[in-house]
Amino acid sequence: MRKKRRNFSSKFKAKVALEALKEQLTLAELATKYELHANQISAWKKELLANSFLLYEKKRGPKVDVDEEKEARLYEQIGKLQFELDWLKKKYRGM
């Protein structure tokens, strides 16, 4: 009978990887503490070191969503077309 594969949350992975970075406990001690394999902890630690720069990649300032701008332009166009349609309906009835 197979064991069910365990899935770990990103918070848990970050917690374990940060503890490994602190090096207050050995990998073997961390593995025992969290019931993981030492290789798994090493992999999470390497991943944290490799991708930690992504935390600072985001630009500051107000976020301008391109979709919102496009949506606003489309609603404006819909309004103009609706106005023209109403005007044409009135003009046609008057004939």
Image: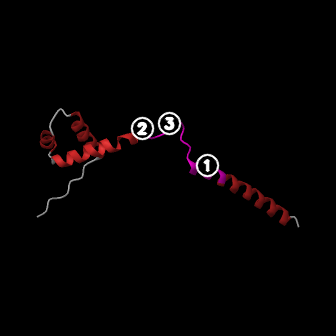
- Reading the image, the residue beneath label 3 is 60
| 3 or 2: mark nearer the eye | 2
- Label 3's element? loop
Where residue 87 sits in the image (x, y, percent)?
Answer: 80, 59
Question: Residue 55 bears which disc, if any?
Answer: none
Q: Where is residue 25 in the image (x, y as percent from the top left)?
A: 15, 35
Residue at image position (13%, 62%) is 2
Amino acid identity at mark 1: Glu
| 36 horizontally vs 15: left or right | left
- Amino acid type, residue under disc 3 in the picture: Arg
Where in the figure is residue 17, as x and y percent of width and height?
A: 25, 41
Quadrant housing residue 30: top left
Q: Distance between the residues labelled 2 and 1?
A: 26 Å
Residue at numbered disc 2: 56
State which quarter of the image contains the N terminus.
bottom left
Report the front residue among 87 and 25.
25
11 sits left or right of 84 in the view: left
Q: Residue extending furthest right? A: 95
Task: Report the residue marked by disc 1.
Answer: 69
Q: How dense is the environment of label 2, judged by Cα within 10 Å: few (below 14), some, or many (20 and up)?
A: few
Q: Distance between the residues labelled 3 and 1?
A: 19 Å
Instruction: Please tell me which of labels 3 and 1 falls first in the chain.
Output: 3
Q: Do the residues labelled 3 and 1 touch (CB within 8 Å)?
A: no
Badge 1 marks a residue whose secondary structure is: helix
At label 1, counting other C-alpha atoms closer than 10 Å, the crowd grade (few under 14, some 14-19, many 20 or more) is few
- Magenta stretch encompasses residue 11: no
